[in-house]
Amino acid sequence: MLDLTSPDGTGQLHITSVRVEAGASTYDFEGPVEGYGLARASATLTHLDADETRGAMRGEARVLGNDGTLVAAAVCGTYRRKGTTIEVYLADSCSNGDMNFVTWSMDLMSKEVSVRYWSLG
């Protein structure tokens, strides 16, 4: 059973850009993730209701480690929005063999994203 009280790692990303289109918004992120390095990611959130309070998420991430290694990850999950905060729940599959359950808490006003992950390893 996955213990969600203590993540294996955390990170702090910053939203660097937002592209809005019919039915979806795409966010770009950058920032450090513990145990991995400097992360850059892009994720498209496609809403399932008119209020854009829930939907599906799909994206890609690249993480550059301090030693120069590059880890790529495909990410896929779901989200829900409450006011100015979006909670994202996803699984990632990394090029180094890691698999993680990940949560993002996106503050749309400050453009800060808190990341927590648990290894499924």
Image (tube, rainbow, N blue to C red):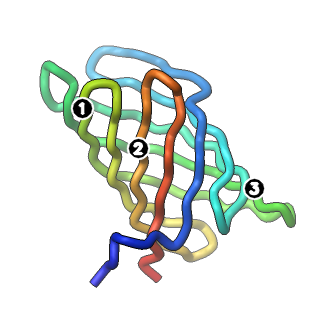
User: Taking 50 as reference, is 93 above or below it?
Assistant: below
Relative placement, left or right, of 110 versus 88 is: right
In the figure, residue 37 lies in which quadrant? bottom right
Q: Residue at x 29, y 31 (%)?
A: 46
Q: Secondary structure at mark 3?
A: strand
Relative placement, left or right, of 70 versus 85 is: right
Amino acid type at circle 3 is: Leu
CB contact under 8 Å: marks 3 and 1: no
Using the image, tell me which numbered label, if any, was put on residue 96. none
Q: Quadrant of the N terminus?
A: bottom left
Residue farthest to the right?
Answer: 67
In the figure, residue 107 lies in which quadrant? top left
Relative placement, left or right, of 70 versus 16 is: right
Amino acid type at circle 2 is: Ser
How far from the left and from the top, in percent, is residue 42? 53, 38
Q: Earlier in the sequence, mark 3 or mark 2?
A: 3
Q: Residue at x 39, y 54 (%)?
A: 103
Using the image, tell me which numbered label, if any, was put on residue 64. 3
How far from the left and from the top, in percent, is residue 52? 21, 25
- Distance Cα–Cα, label 3 vs label 2: 22 Å
Name the residue tied to disc 2.
105
Q: Residue at x 39, y 61 (%)?
A: 91
- Is 48 in front, or is 29? 29
Relative placement, left or right, of 11 versus 58 is: right
Using the image, tell me which numbered label, if any, was put on residue 82. 1
Q: Residue at x 52, y 28 (%)?
A: 111
Amino acid type at circle 1 is: Lys
